[in-house]
Image: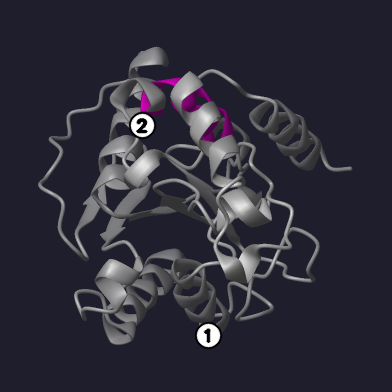
Amino acid sequence: MHPKDRALSDLEERVVACRLCPRLVAWREEISKHKPKRFAKETYWSKPVPGFGDSSAKLLIVGLAPAAHGGNRTGRIFTGDRSGDFLFDALYRFGYSNSPLSIGKNDSLVLNKVYITATVRCAPPNNKPLLEEIINCRPYLIEELNILKNIHVILALGRIAFDGIFKTLKIMAKEKGELFPVKKPSFSHGIELTLPDGKILVASFHPSQQNTFTGRLTKSMFDAVLKRIDQLLNS
């Protein structure tokens, strides 16, 4: 096993075993006791959901948190819900995935040059993690960034992910004794920010049903972001 893959595997084990946030532990386990009828016969994952993807990734995608009946059910981030359907269909069309569908941890999906993670690893009530929960999860994101040495572009899906990754990168720079003279701009779809270490942070509206079903985020809007990322990665 490649050292990076081994490091990610070790991290995954620690993420899955995490019980740092009592509120999230209680909620993720409670969800499986009140399943919708369509999932009544399924056994829920109901544990923290680790990141996954290509250890040689040049693109890092950061989401908010696992969905109650998506990642919290299937054990894979952005898997088993409409947000994931939207995301993986786009990744497939742009060559980042071998399949437009992400069904579960044991399917045949393979990501190419992309790694997907989240600001918080457990499904939060009402999709709203507390600040202390974001802080508790931050070391996992820092460790992923330290392992994934080839990341050039970071795509933040939604305001919480954008704020979270910006704060994370600022903390990492401070820990290394590096300057980070960048003011965080207000979140908006398509915003692009060049960071002191050369990485580029790009933002998109989150592909939640609330956004995609209302037209706040359309297929063409998201494609435009991925097309721009292609240009950044190939320039």
Q: Which residue is mark 1?
A: 93
Q: Is residue 110 above or below residue 99?
A: above
Name the front one of labels 1 and 2: 1
Q: How many marks?
A: 2
Left or right: residue 222 versus residue 77 is left
The residue at 42%/51% (across/down) is 63
- Residue 87 point in image, percent of width and height: 47, 71
- Residue 59 point in image, percent of width and height: 50, 57
Q: Residue furthest right?
A: 1
Left or right: residue 176 versus residue 48 is left
Q: Identify residue type, mark 1.
A: Arg
Q: Is residue 188 above or below residue 29?
A: below
Disc 2 is placed on an element classified as helix
- In depth, the one of 49 and 2 nearer the eye is 49
- Residue 27 point in image, percent of width and height: 49, 35
Q: Quadrant of the N terminus?
A: top right
Q: Which residue is mark 2?
A: 169
For the stretch drawn in magenta, the main secondary structure is helix
Q: Which quadrant would residue 206 be assigned to in this image?
A: bottom left
- In depth, the one of 192 and 32 nearer the eye is 32
> Is 14 included in the stretch rendered in magenta?
no
Q: Is residue 93 above or below residue 153?
A: below
Q: How is the image coloured?
A: one colour
First of labels 1, 2 by sequence position: 1
Q: Is residue 211 above or below residue 141?
A: below
Disc 1 is placed on an element classified as helix
Task: Check residue 123 in the rendering and tell me which mark sits there, or answer none.
Answer: none
The residue at 27%/68% (across/down) is 210
Query: Is residue 196 at all visible to an observer of this figure?
Result: no
Q: Identify residue type, mark 2.
A: Leu
Residue interval drawn in magenta: 134-145
